[in-house]
Structures are given as structure tokens and as C-alpha cells.
Amino acid sequence: MADRLTPEETIKLLNLLEATLDAIPDGILALDLDRRIVAYNRQYLRMFDFTADQLRQGGIDWIIQALAPLIEGRDEVLSASAPIWSQPDHDSLDEMRFKDGRVYERIISPNRRGAQVLGLVASFRDISHAKQTEQALEQHRAFLEKAQEVAHIGSWVAEMDGSDRLGWSREAHRIFGLTATEFEGTHEAFFTRVHQSDRDAVRAASDAALEGTRPYDIEHRIVRPDGSVRWVHEKADIVRDDGGAPLRMIGTMQDVTERRLLEDQLRQSQKMEAIGRLAGGIAHDLNNALTAIAGYSELAIGQLAASHPARADVEEIRRGAERAGSVTRQLLAFSRKELLEPRLFDVNQTISALGRLLSRLLGADIEVRTELAPSVPPILGDPGQFEQAVINLAVNARDAMPHGGRLLLSTAVEDLDLVSARANMPMAPGRYIVLRVSDSGHGMTPDTLAHIFEPFFTTKEPGKGTGLGLSMVYGTLKQIGGFIFADSEVGRGTTFRLYFRPAAARQPDSPAAAAAPTEPDSEGRPTVLVVEDEAAVRNLVASTLRKEGYRLLLAGSAEEAIEIAAANPDGIDLLLTDAIMPGKSGLDLAQELVSRSPRLRVIVMSGYTQDTLSGLNDSVELLQKPFAPRELRQRIRVALDQAKENSRLR
Ligand code: ADP
Ligand code: MG
């Protein structure tokens, strides 16, 4: 018969078969229906660490015994594969997991001849490495997902192949409030969830990024299915092919809603603080003027007969001043300002220290230079507020130099004659310390320049400018008793000029020292020491009290008052002092004098309310500005009665 093989041929064929089996990288084991081993290959022995003898002697039962302790979930494996072993009429695939971490894939197939099943062939493949990689990948993915969840940062991939596909990470879904099945996974589906007012901006940003003109970096709002609005910050990179055509966009999105809320709150509170400071500064100045107006009108009324035609008019003036006084009181209460801490400081020193800070604050492309006068006389004010004012000016300068430039801070001492003082209207002639803050920025139109000190005036986009920076500077300058001017032209930069009186020059503003020991010393008359830096108020108080017959000592500053007190040991019954004055404050003065003569009564005059004036003690009371002379007279009388009572009890 032609298809009969000769014994040599059969042996040849068997050898070939054996060689083929051994060449296969999978382990192979074949059984017949009586569970006898009919074939295996070398790889099988190697994979399970068996010897040919062990198989020959032990057969399949020995194999199962030998493997049992090594395999994880053995019982399940056995029971699941039992029907296959016993009736192998279809292919089956499963995994064998070893306790040492190896994983083999096992395929069992029936060995058929025609329709008849003769036995089965099992093949084993080591997939440990693939499994490990898969596991590491899974771990990595879980880690990334957790990190995104913690940071509220989602990620996304947008295909640019025309398929419109957009893939989101789990956190991205969470940010949008959508489940994986609810999001359709397309650009269009994304855009429908972008807040309507932001859609154009997002499209424009993405177009610009694809054209390569601007990186994709945008904050915009999205709307969740429940209607709530969130803010997200998106950034993305574009992957391009060799020709530069975009393949895909890979981006992140961060939920920044909380940060935006905080920023809004901060901006709001900064606004309130700025207005408060401005209001406080203005109210403080205004109070002194109102005290004088109300006081003098009352004095005038006292001299006018009831029938005098001017009397009703002057009464109106007084009522007007009182009404205005209640407004300034409200302003001060609203501003809730702590007392300023005026002290002597050197502008040169402050500016040179600030210059170093500013060059860091403004960034590398702005050159900060200082040019200081050899020496400047000290000025009196709150140095912290002064610094803040200069910082505000510097920040404005930076905003005016988006592409870098130069900021120059220079100081000088200048004597202003009558002519130039008149040109700078509110200023009196005399010596001034001048600080110039110049930038090489874009400058201002005359129209802008006319409004810059107004609260809320800004040319910056919403969210960038508050329009309060210069209002604050203005308020601070008013409190220090300085002046500010701006010179600017479009394209030519801007220079702010700040003028301050030297501290010593402010004292002659008060001719009090000369007038101090005017009253003849006479027995029995109570002595009142009046300390007030504002001449108008001091004179008003003096003319009111003089009529009452008190003996008066007048001082224009706390320092002067201390000298007067030293010259009148035990001779002062009452100290009437302003709270805030250049140099030592009225409160400090009171403390010092009371510690020397404990019987001294003290009345502090101030626009501030009791609770903002900390440090008032029992022997010190507050007279709120503006006040009317009759109130002053009454308060002095009560305080002096009290003093008399005290000395009688002693
Ligand atoms: P903001 O800076 O919040 O706008 P400011 O009160 O600090 O408020 O300034 C008001 C406006 O004055 C600014 O919006 C700007 O138009 C203008 N301005 C201030 N400083 C400068 C400067 N150095 N150069 C050009 N313009 C300035
Ligand atoms: Mg500003």
C-alpha cells in the first residue's frame, strides 16, 4: 500500500515530530482518554521542573499531586477543569497562578480524529511577565487617578484626526459632574457643557493653540447637569506630526472654583480696606475743620443779640457743621482704623531698603534704580503706610511696563518759593522732601490723568484693577500731611512726585509755644493744659475756656506740653489733649503726666470712638470731635469737679 510507511520512515517522522514539539516555546502535554500520558515536550518539563522519569512513573495523578501545593486556588482550578479533563469536546482557556507569582496560560483542546475524540492536548504558556506589566500599569493608573482626585485635576486627550474624539480621565468626569456613560466623548459634547458666555473664548483659545500662536491656557466656567457653575483652569500641549500638523491635544483641567471664590473675597476685603483708609484719612482732616467751624459759629452766636439779622444764618452754619460731624463720625467708625503710629523716619533709608524688595517684586525685566539725595531731614508719619504707598506706585508702574522697562526712585530736598508753591496749589512755600517715582511705561492720556486718584477709577480689565491703589496712596499722603502730583504723557512714561514737610518744619505751624505761659498765675483758678497741633482747634478751645475764667497753658505738641508741665509742677488740674499729633501721641503724653501727678484729670479729644482708642484708663476720658463749645465747657467743668472731689477725699 502506497501510504504505508516503512519502519525507517516512521522513525524519521517520529523524530521530526519530537524535534518540532521540543522547538515550540509553549509546554505541551497530551493524554489519552484513559488519562495516560502519550506525549510531552522539553519545554513542559522545564516549566514545571519535572523529569521524564517522574512523568513516566507517576502519570497524571502524580502531576496533580505534585502541583497542588504550588498552585493558588487549586480547588477551583481543578473543579473548573474537571469536565474538560473528563470530556474534552471543546477548547478551554484558563490561567494557572502559582504561589511564587508565576502565571501560566493553559489551553486544553480535544485531540480528534474525524468526529472521534482520542484524548486531549494541553499547552502552557508563561505569561508572568505580561501579567506583571499589566499589574504595574493598573497600579500606576490607580495612583494617577488618586492624584488627580486629590488635586482636583482631570486630564484629557483630544484627537485631531477629524474623528472629534475626546477622552476624559475619571476626575475630569467628576469635575463636570458626569459619569463615564453620560459623557459622549466628543469635542461638541464638551462645548455644550462650557458656560455659554465663555464658549467663544474657549474656541478662540483652542484655535490659537492649534495655529501655534498661543499656548492653550485658559480659565473658564462650565455648567454641571444640576445647573451649578464651576470654574476650571485648562492647559494643554499639542502633539504634531513631522510636518507640523496637529495629531492630538493633551491637556489638564483643574477645578479652581474655591480659589476663585477666595480671590473674590480677598479683592472685596481689599476694596473695603482701601475705602476705609481713604475715608479715615479724609474724616480725620475734616473733623478738625468742622470742630473749628462749629466752635466759632457758637462763639459768634454768643456775641450776637437774638434780634441780630445774622444770628439765624450763623445758627444754620453751626447746624450744618454738626450734621457734617455726624457723617465724619460714621466714616471713622466704618473705617475702624487703628490709630496710626506716626514716628520720625528717614525717607532715604526707607527707599533704599524698599528698592531691593521692589527689584525682586517687579521681576527681572524691570530695572529698579534709586538715586538718593546725600541726606534728607526726617519726616513724621507711619513708615509702614508710607512703604505701602510706594509699593502701590511701583505695582502700577509694573502694570504700565508689560514688556519690561525702568523704575527710578529718587529723593531730593527742595525749597519751594511762593511762585512754585502757588503753581502746586494746596502747598505752602518752604522746604520739602521730594520723592519721585518714574517709570518708562506707556504713560497716560490727559483724560486718564485727570481721574487717577478717584476711588474705583481704573483702566484695567475687570479682575485686574480695583481702581483703589492711588486712592490709598492719596489717603496715606493726606494723613502724613504730604502732597502728590502725577506727570505723564502717552508713550513717555509717568512720574509721581510726593512732597513731605520735614518734621521740624511742621512745629512752627503752631505759635503755641510763644503764647503758652500767657495767663497770670492767680490762686483759686483751675489750670488747664491744652495740647493740640491744629492751630484752629487750639485757638477755638482757648477762646472758649478763657471766657470761663480758667488759667490756660497751650502747647502745639506733646513734647512742648512736657516742657510746660515740668515748669509748672503740681500746678495743672486738667490735661486736654488731641489724640493724634505729630511726634508723641496724646495718649502717651497723658500716661506720662499722670504717672508724675496721679491726681491729674485727662480729657482726650479725638474723632475716633472709644473702642478704637485702646489704652484709655479711668482717669482719661474721651471728648469726641467735632464738638461744640458748650459740650467742651460742660465736660471740663465736670472733670474739674471730679478732680476737686478727689483731692478732698485724699
Ligand atoms: P488700578 O491699578 O487698580 O487700576 P490705581 O488707583 O492704582 O488703580 O490706578 C488707577 C489708574 O491710573 C490705572 O488703572 C491706570 O490707568 C493709571 N495709572 C496709575 N499709575 C500708572 C502708571 N505708572 N502708568 C500709567 N498709568 C497709570
Ligand atoms: Mg494700582
Image (spheres, rainbow, N blue to C red):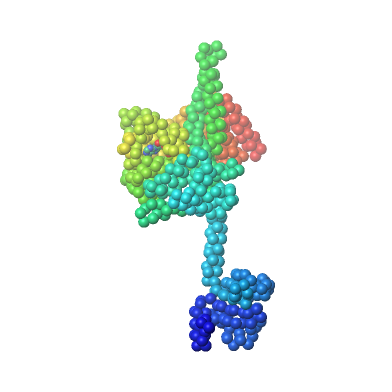
The answer to whether residue 556 of the structure is visible from this angle is: no
Residue at 49%, 30% in the rendered image? 286
Query: Residue 49 location, x and y as percent?
Result: 57, 82
Q: Quick check: 176 above or below 133? A: above
- For the image, the number of numbered tags is 0
Quadrant of the rendered structure where residue 57 is?
Answer: bottom right
Q: Viewer-proximal residue, 146 or 274? A: 146
Report whether 564 appears left or right of 40. Answer: left
From the viewer's side, name the closer residue of 72 and 435: 72
Quadrant of the image containing the C terminus: top right
Q: Residue at x 52, y 20 (%)?
A: 317
Residue at the image point whose x is 32% and y is 35% from the top: 489
Side of 220 relative to 404 (left or right) = right
Specify whether 615 is left or right of 289. right
Q: Residue at x 50, y 53 (%)?
A: 156
Q: Quadrant of ligand 2?
A: top left
Residue 287 drawn at (x, y percent): 51, 30
- Quarter-of-image position of residue 417: top left
Q: Which one is in front, 266 or 639?
A: 266
